[in-house]
Image: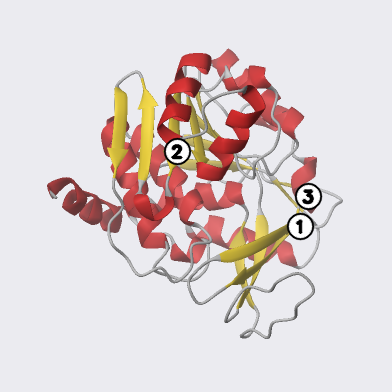
Amino acid sequence: MIVVLGSINIDLVVQVPELARPGETVAGDDLKLFPGGKGANQAVAAARAGANVRMVGALGKDGFAGVAMSGLKEAGIDSAAVRTVDRPTGVALISVDRNGQNYITVAPGANFSVEADWLAGNLNAKDHLALQLEIPLTEVSKAISRARSVGAKTCLNAAPAKELAEEAYSGLDFLVVNETEAQMIAARFGMAEAPLEFAKAAHKRWKLAAIVTLGSEGALAFGEVGLIQVKAPDIRAIDTTAAGDTFVGAFLAAIDGGRGMPRALVEGVAAGSLACTKAGAQTSMPVAAEIAALANRMNSI
């Protein structure tokens, strides 16, 4: 099973002709509401990719909570460990331009009440724990230690980029970052910033599998099996909002399903690419059959 400890939000999305510059007002289309949050997004992506998933997180007592939970329920995710707290449900304000690029502002709200201790009774040795950085960093570090103590494997998507304690990285099995996040981590720890060199350095330093997503170029990974590179298929991007989360969810679903790093990386890239072809976050995420079909075509090229 994949256990996700992370954020649950609603996304308030506006399509705009172009992203606003500082001090500029841009008129957009009608406001749309979607369930979101990096934690919930990755949970839904993994479930749609065929994994059994449990979500551990927090919501407020407001009207946004039901919308935020709707995607988890529709995906059949075990959400018994999602708690209600005395803070507003998390909200992401998202503008998306005609090329699918976006600006995102997040109000964490209830997500900053999430605790690693909530994993008690919800994480076992055979599980894969998925983490992101939209909950307090101290709780992320505690969750990594807890996973290690029970024998579970841990994947951290170090996004949005923040200064996590170095000892936390040493407890990981998988680290997933995009190019910008890789550069920020590399600069902090005096490592090479180029994607491949960063992945090699991260693997050597923290004994983990380091995965760097490369947007329209695909992704690469470096770990015990050496270098794996996957080129992204040609697609027409509509909205890139959930591409990274979809990659992580599908990648972990493949790992949890025992399909190994090479296939997992292909399925992650395939799923992330497919997510870019539809609007929204969770609403854009492909199902297992769609991922497998594209992944098989990618492998045959």
Q: Position of residue 299 (x, y in %)?
A: 18, 46
Q: Position of residue 68 (x, y in %)?
A: 65, 61
Residue located 58% across and 29% down the image: 186
Q: Residues within 10 Å of mark 1 (few under 14, many from 20)?
A: many
Q: Residues within 10 Å of mark 3 (few under 14, many from 20)?
A: many
Of labels 1 and 2, the one closer to you: 2
Pointers 3 and 1 in contact (C-beta within 8 Å): yes
- The quarter of the rendered structure image containing the N terminus is top left
Q: Residue furthest left?
A: 300
Q: Residues within 10 Å of mark 2 (few under 14, many from 20)?
A: many
Amino acid at circle 3: Ala
Q: Circle 1 sits in a helix, a strand or a loop, which is it?
A: loop
Vertical order, 154 against 93 (above or below): above
Residue located 42% across and 63% down the image: 276
Is residue 293 rendered to the left or right of residue 261? left
Q: Nearer the viewer, residue 54 or 207?
A: 207
Residue located 74% across and 47% down the image: 111
Q: Position of residue 58 (x, y in %)?
A: 72, 47
Q: Position of residue 128 (x, y in %)?
A: 48, 30
Rendered image: mark on residue 89 = 1
Mark 3 and mark 2: Cα distance apart in space: 29 Å
Q: Circle 2 sits in a helix, a strand or a loop, which is it?
A: strand
Amino acid at circle 2: Val
Residue holding disc 3 = 110
Residue holding disc 2 = 212
Mark positioned earlier in the residue sequence (1 or 2)? 1
Amino acid at circle 1: Thr
Q: Nearer the viewer, residue 248 or 187?
A: 187
Mark positioned earlier in the residue sequence (3 or 1)? 1
Dividing the picture into quarters, in which one does residue 12 lie?
A: bottom right
